[in-house]
Amino acid sequence: MTAPLTTTGPPRSEPGPSSGAPDDGPARTSVRDRITAELATTPGRLALATAVAVVACLLLAVTGFLAGSSQSAALRDAQRDAAQLVGTQELRNDLVSADATATNAFLVGGLEPTEARERYEASVSEAAEALPALASTAQGADETADLATVSDSVQRYAGLVESARANNRQGFPVGAAYLDQASAALRDEVLPTLDDVAVSTSERVDDDLTSVSLSQALLLFVLLGLVALAAVQLWLARRTHRRLNLGLAAASVALLVGGIVATVAVLGGNGVARSVASGPYAATVATSQALSLATDAKSMESFTLIKRGSGAEFEESYQTSVAQARDLLTEAQDASDTGSDPLALLNAWDEKHAEIRALDDGGQWDEAVDAATSTADDSAGAAFTAFSDQAHADVETTSTAAVDRLGSAATTAQIAAWVALVLGVAGAVAAAAGMNVRLKEYR
């Protein structure tokens, strides 16, 4: 008998799991297959439609709130910065007015008229009171430092004017030198610094108004939410052959109202910002600058007489300033009709100035000084006061209109933001409830 054949060697191993990382490919495929299978059923598709409807409502709520809130903040910033710019220009006007009054009073010699002294002190006092308020609302360390420099320079200017006044009262010629130093300190130190602050503030206003318009981009997401909800309703109507779902209908009404409110408020706010920028705000800036130039020209008129025949450069400066003021007042009239005509008053004063120059050029210096310092109703001083008062009134009117309109638009945008948020969330709840009714039919 032959013995059975045997083999030697290691035992054959049974197949088993490898020593490497486990392969979860089948598990992932299984999950994907289950999701696909679930979405192939009507309940799965209803659940997906529910999620889409809720997300669409919340999308409108969030984006509508962001659009309204961001625009409201930009409008508030524009309102604040516009008021800051007007305040800076008014401060400049107060200082230039003080200088014009002090220079004109210097022509009288001896003890200056009480009225002129009171006007000078009022202008300096208003400037001193305005500086802390402007510094408290200044944006950035640079503006704060600039306004602190202005404050120091104004005190130095006032001291030089007092020295000029004291020497002039005693008939000392050195008074004119002190007055020159005071005027130089104002024009070389104070006014350029204020102009820099005004430029930076104006740039911020422009940036604020640009931000107002950028909020409109968020309205595209509001529209997307409305379209998505409408698509869900259309799909549900075709799938269930029922035209009305109370929950989705309520959600649609809520989103439609919220979308309309947000859209109208944001587009309206942008329209207000544009109209203010080209209307009362532009008129305020132009009129204020024209007033500053004309007031500076008033100082040049006095300096021309103080120099007694050697003030040609001051007369040239006068003519340049008046010409620029005319252009600015024309721009102001085009931007906003206040019902007044400061340009006509400026021209009336310029005609009086021409009479003063005719007297001085004709060798009648005393008569020219009398005409320049007179306060009679038909004098150059009265003509300039009429122009200055009207320009100040126009600045007050247009600046108030600009600030009020920006503030009103900001409030409207913020209210619209909350309306969109509340209605969007309410729409999400209603949509979920309405879709849940259909889901229950398959359970």
Image (cartoon, helix red, strand yellow):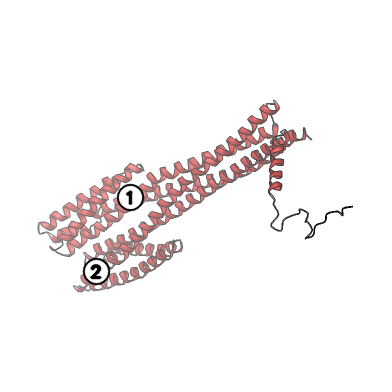
Disc 2 secondary structure class: helix
Disc 1 secondary structure class: helix
Residue type for callout 1: Thr
Residue at 13 percent across and 61 percent down: it is: 365
Q: Nearer the viewer, residue 260 or 113?
A: 260
Q: Nearer the viewer, residue 236 or 111?
A: 236
Residue at 33 percent across and 53 percent down: it is: 288
Locate residue 125: give its quadrant: bottom left
Residue at 15 percent across and 55 percent down: it is: 357
* Residue 206 pos. (x, y %): 40, 51
* Residue 283 pos. (x, y %): 35, 47
The residue that label 2 is drawn on is 179
The residue that label 1 is drawn on is 287
Q: Nearer the viewer, residue 204 or 26?
A: 26
Residue 378 seen in this snapshot: no
Mark 2 Cα shell of 10 Å, populated few (<14), some (14-19), many (≥20): many
In the image: residue 363, left or right of residue 20: left
Residue 416 seen in this snapshot: yes
Q: Nearer the viewer, residue 400 or 244?
A: 244
Residue type for callout 2: Leu
